[in-house]
């Protein structure tokens, strides 16, 4: 049983020779584990079971060593604080609830296809994921600001729906490209939670988030 077969079996609730796993650590957690093990390159000794072609806006550092990164959507991320992996947003790409003031980036199809072509050529015994990070709600609040977008759900419902529809349409183009390749699964990264439930509540989740997620899952 190879890794791909093992993961597919586990997904179907079938007994496997061992439980498949993947390890994805934040910078801080990886450094703590390296200190504990006394081995900075311990991850190199873990055989990969999953490989992913993952679109998250392709952040690029503005200036080497600056700690400031900008994604394809124009959002500026500051990684100089406690969060070295994602960072916190500085500024606001969409300061007003007006979709006409923003143009979505042209999708770099050649770059995306090159990542999926590489994935397709890799070891056939590894489970292969396509993926979109910050796929819907998270993409909306990174553009609009979290507090403002949550306010929009109550005060500017038409704008909130239009923004989420636009993000969904953009994502569907990415999924269409991914489906040209022999992937085994697809991962949508989106965070709706807080300590005691959904941050926007189940009513607004069903109204605003579910329609786009349903389209993406159906695709």
Image (cartoon, rainbow, N blue to C red):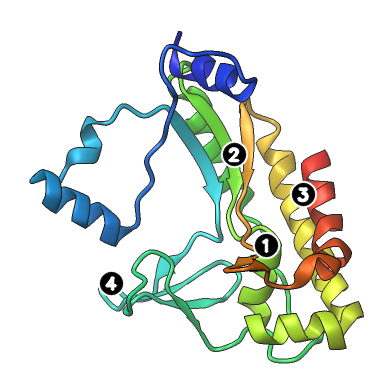
For the view shown, which residue lies furthest in the left direction? 38
Real-space CA distance between mark 1 and mark 3, rounded to the nearest whole angstrom = 14 Å
State which quadrant residue 98 falls in: bottom right
Classed neighbour count for the residue bearing mark 3: other residues with Cα under 10 Å, few (<14), some (14–19), many (≥20): some
> What secondary structure is found at the residue carrying circle 3?
helix
Q: What number is the disc on residue 172?
A: 3
For the view shown, which residue lies furthest in the front direction? 196
- Residue beneath disc 1: 106
Real-space CA distance between mark 2 and mark 4, rounded to the nearest whole angstrom = 29 Å
**Which comes sooner in the sequence, label 1 or label 3?**
1
For the view shown, which residue lies furthest in the right direction? 158
Q: Is residue 72 left or right of residue 68?
A: right
Mark 2 touches mark 4? (CB < 8 Å):
no
Q: Give residue 33's position: percent from left, percent from top.
A: 20, 50
Q: What number is the disc on residue 130?
A: 2
> What secondary structure is found at the residue carrying circle 2?
strand
Classed neighbour count for the residue bearing mark 2: other residues with Cα under 10 Å, few (<14), some (14–19), many (≥20): many
Q: Nearer the viewer, residue 143 or 153?
A: 153
> What secondary structure is found at the residue carrying circle 1?
loop
**Which comes sooner in the sequence, label 3 or label 4?**
4
Q: Quadrant of the N terminus?
A: top left
Real-space CA distance between mark 4 and mark 1, rounded to the nearest whole angstrom = 25 Å
């Amino acid at each position: 049983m190879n890794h791909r077969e093992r993961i597919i079996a586990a997904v179907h609730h079938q007994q496997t020779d061992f439980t498949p796993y993947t390890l994805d650590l934040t910078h801080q957690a990886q450094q703590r584990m390296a200190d504990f093990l006394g081995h900075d390159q311990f991850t190199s000794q873990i055989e990969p079971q999953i490989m992913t072609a993952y679109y998250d806006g392709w952040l690029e550092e503005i200036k080497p060593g600056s700690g400031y990164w900008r994604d394809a959507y124009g959002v500026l991320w500051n990684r100089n604080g406690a969060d070295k992996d994602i960072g916190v947003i500085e500024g606001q790409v969409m300061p007003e609830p007006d979709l006409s003031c923003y143009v979505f980036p042209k999708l770099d199809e050649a770059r995306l296809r090159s990542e999926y072509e590489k994935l397709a050529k890799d070891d056939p015994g590894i489970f292969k994921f396509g993926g979109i990070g910050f796929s819907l709600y998270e993409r909306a609040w990174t553009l609009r600001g979290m507090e403002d977008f949550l306010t929009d759900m109550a005060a500017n419902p038409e704008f909130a729906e239009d923004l989420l529809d636009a993000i969904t349409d953009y994502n569907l183009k990415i999924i269409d490209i991914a489906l040209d390749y022999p992937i085994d699964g697809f991962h949508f990264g989106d965070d709706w939670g807080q300590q005691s439930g959904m941050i926007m509540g189940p009513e607004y989740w069903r109204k605003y988030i579910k329609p786009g997620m349903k389209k993406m899952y159906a695709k």
